[in-house]
């Protein structure tokens, strides 16, 4: 029996999209649980898993037990990666 590769590809693409949507929903829920943002706000501000990872990295710096100067130095060291995330958060609360 021949395989309809076009139908197979379409089905796989649909399943990947559905899985990505569910993953984004789950990640948004987890991220909102440690912030003052709602699930919907997290999904809007950080639509991809990579965006949520950056939020997590920023939150780790902010919420660490380190002194403020150490936090600032860590943020400066990672500003290219985390600057956009910080701007999104400040924009949401401003």
Image (cartoon, rainbow, N blue to C red):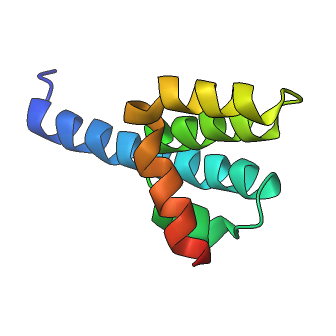
Q: Nearer the viewer, residue 16 or 69?
A: 69
Q: Can you tell which quarter of the image residue 70 is in? A: top right
> Does residue 75 sit above or below 55 in this rendering?
above
Task: Locate residue 20: give its quadrant.
Answer: top left
- Drawn side of residue 56 relative to residue 21, left or right: right
Q: Quadrant of the C terminus?
A: bottom right
Which residue appears farthest toward the bottom when viewing the image? 94
Q: Residue at x 62, y 75 (%)?
A: 93
Residue in the picture at 67% in, 66% down: 39
Asked if residue 43 is positioned above or below residue 70 in the image, the reply reads below
Judge whether 10 appears above or below 80 on screen: below
Left/right placement of residue 87 relative to residue 6 reads right
Residue 15, position as x, y percentages in the image: 39, 43
Q: Nearer the viewer, residue 53 or 49?
A: 53
Question: What is the tally of numbered marks visible in this picture?
Answer: 0
**Farthest right residue in view:** 65
Which quadrant holds the N terminus?
A: top left
* Residue shown at the point (48%, 49%) measured from the top left: 85
**Residue 24, image x and y in percent?**
54, 49
Residue 35 horizontal/vertical position (percent): 76, 58
Answer whether residue 27 is visible to the viewer in this image.
yes
> Which residue lies at the image location 11% right of the left edge and 22% below the top edge?
2
Residue 48 visible: no
As drawn, the residue found furthest toward the front would be: 69
The x and y percentages for residue 48 are: 43, 46
Q: Nearer the viewer, residue 9 or 42?
A: 42
């Amino acid at each position: 029996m021949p395989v309809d590769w076009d139908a197979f590809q379409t089905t796989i693409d649909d399943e990947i999209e559905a899985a990505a949507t569910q993953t984004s929903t789950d990640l948004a829920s987890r991220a909102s649980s440690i912030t003052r943002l709602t699930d919907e706000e997290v999904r809007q501000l950080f639509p991809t898993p990579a965006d949520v990872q950056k939020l997590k990295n920023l939150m780790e710096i902010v919420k660490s037990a380190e002194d403020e100067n150490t936090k600032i130095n860590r943020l400066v060291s990672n500003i290219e990666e985390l600057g956009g995330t910080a701007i999104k958060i400040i924009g949401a609360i401003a």
